[in-house]
Image (cartoon, rainbow, N blue to C red):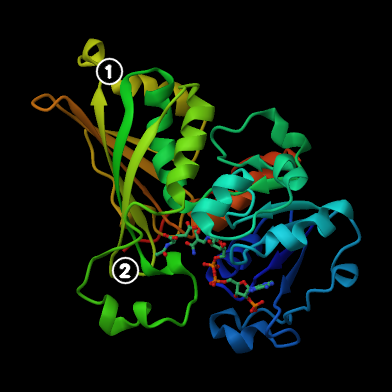
Amino acid sequence: MKAVIIGATGYGGLELIRLLQSHPQIDALSCVSTSQSGEAIAKIYPHLTHMKSRLEALEIDQLVQGDELIFFATPHGVSSQLAPSFIEKGCVVIDLSGDFRLPGDEYRQWYQREPAPPQWQKKSIYGLTEWVDDTILDASLIANPGCFATASLLAILPLLKHQLIEPRLVIDGKTGVSGAGRTADATFIFSELNENIRPYRVVGHQHIPEMERYAKLFSGQPEVLITFTPHLVPMTRGMIVTIYAHVRPEYQAFDFNEVYQTYYEKSPFIRLFPNGFPQSKHVQGSNFCDIGWSFDQRTNQLIIIAAIDNLVKGAAGQAIQNANLRFGYPQESGLLFSPLSP
Ligand SMILES: NC(=O)C1=CN([C@@H]2O[C@H](COP(=O)(O)OP(=O)(O)OC[C@H]3O[C@@H](n4cnc5c(N)ncnc54)[C@H](OP(=O)(O)O)[C@@H]3O)[C@@H](O)[C@H]2O)C=CC1
Ligand SMILES: CC(=O)N[C@@H](CCC(=O)OP(=O)(O)O)C(=O)O
């Protein structure tokens, strides 16, 4: 199958290139750039000198016949405009941006942008890979989840679904700087980032409505309230979420491992650490999501910690896992390799 990456020069696109190169079911790859089409990929990214291809222009008739797999790794506001034309041609679109994750009114409020047309928004399915059902087999538009939302939802959904915890959660997130993309912005220069931990978008992060919406949808709980605070930390990739959840009184002696095992026994990318503590380095470069937890009897809180690589399980890796699920390939296809260490 041929894959097309729109936004190939950005960090998400670059990670898609890395992973798709060795994907057994992908035999052709077009890398699209609006600003540098015609340029050799190796010229922009010397670590890809072995690739002989050039960046292609965003010209739909030249890029696709109608049975291609399209990845949008573009800023918010781009796929809502462009994805419909690819889908109308018969392609399957996987969107790494937030354009199709929320209903229009919520998108407008949290992204301060005009949403996708409602008929297209309704067509999309939310691709949290471990929780999607068979509807993905017919999907023409898959909204790849945000990175913080991925780590948080994977960690809390089994507990919410079994009503083991109160549906009011506090989540503290820490992310590496590649989460912000390949942005030329003074906020992200070395001297501002180094030896610094910076909280950002406190109370207003766009993953809050995403987490609440899909926590409710997948768990069946009528209301879930999430307080989420992200922090930028001086590392390139990786993220950790630390979640504080009140355990319902009747479940204080519960074996939480049992419920996690039940949900994730057939999930090759979820690694569980009962009474253990995942670290961002232990998933670096991989599609794994490590989840650990510990019960604090004194405060009756379960502390759950989840670690992912924001560019892999939080973006390109999960997008490819979604493609695997959509086309009935093994979900590990092209994705099962060890994290980088040291
Ligand atoms: N970085 C991360 O960890 C994660 C990112 N995401 C989401 O993935 C998307 C991509 O993120 P990321 O790769 O980090 O961002 P980058 O800023 O690194 O890259 C975005 C790319 O999009 C292309 N682009 C910009 N404007 C347009 C346009 N109008 N039409 C077509 N292409 C355009 C640019 O390439 P060119 O100018 O060459 O066309 C650019 O390289 C974003 O929506 C982001 O929110 C989601 C999860 C995690
Ligand atoms: C450091 C940094 O800015 N990180 C980004 C992560 C982006 C992400 O996960 O994606 P979406 O924007 O597609 O939801 C952020 O917090 O917004």
- Mark 2 surroundings: few (<14), some (14-19) or many (≥20) residues within 10 A: some
- Please give the name of the residue rendered at 78% of the width and 36% of the height, measured from the top-left corner: 138
Q: Tell me if I can see residue 72 in this picture.
A: yes
- Could you tell me residue 194's position as x and y percent? 24, 77
Q: Amino acid at mark 2?
A: Met
Numbered circle sitting on residue 74: none
Which residue is farthest left?
298
Q: Quadrant of residue 19?
A: bottom right
Q: Measure how far apart labels 1 and 2 are at the Cα level.
A: 35 Å
Quarter residue 202 falls in: bottom left
Say which amino acid is labelled 1: Asp
User: How many marks can you see?
Assistant: 2
Image position, residue 108 (x, y; %): 57, 53
Q: Is residue 268 shown above or below 190? A: above
Find numbered disc 2 in the image and state the secondary structure of the residue it sits on. loop
Q: Which mark is residue 255?
A: 1
Mark 1 vs 2, N-terminal side: 2
- In this view, which residue lies farthest toward the top? 250
Side of 287 relative to 196 (left or right): right
Residue 337 vs residue 164, the one in the foreground = 164
Q: Image quadrant for the N terminus? A: bottom right
Ligand 1, image quadrant it occupies = bottom right
Measured from the top left, where is residue 130 in percent x and y?
A: 54, 35
Left or right position of 243 against 130:
left
Q: Position of residue 22 (x, y in %)?
A: 64, 61
Question: As drawn, is 259 to the left or to the right of 331?
Answer: left
Residue annotated with mark 2: 235
- Disc 1: CA contacts within 10 A as few (<14), some (14-19) or many (>=20): few
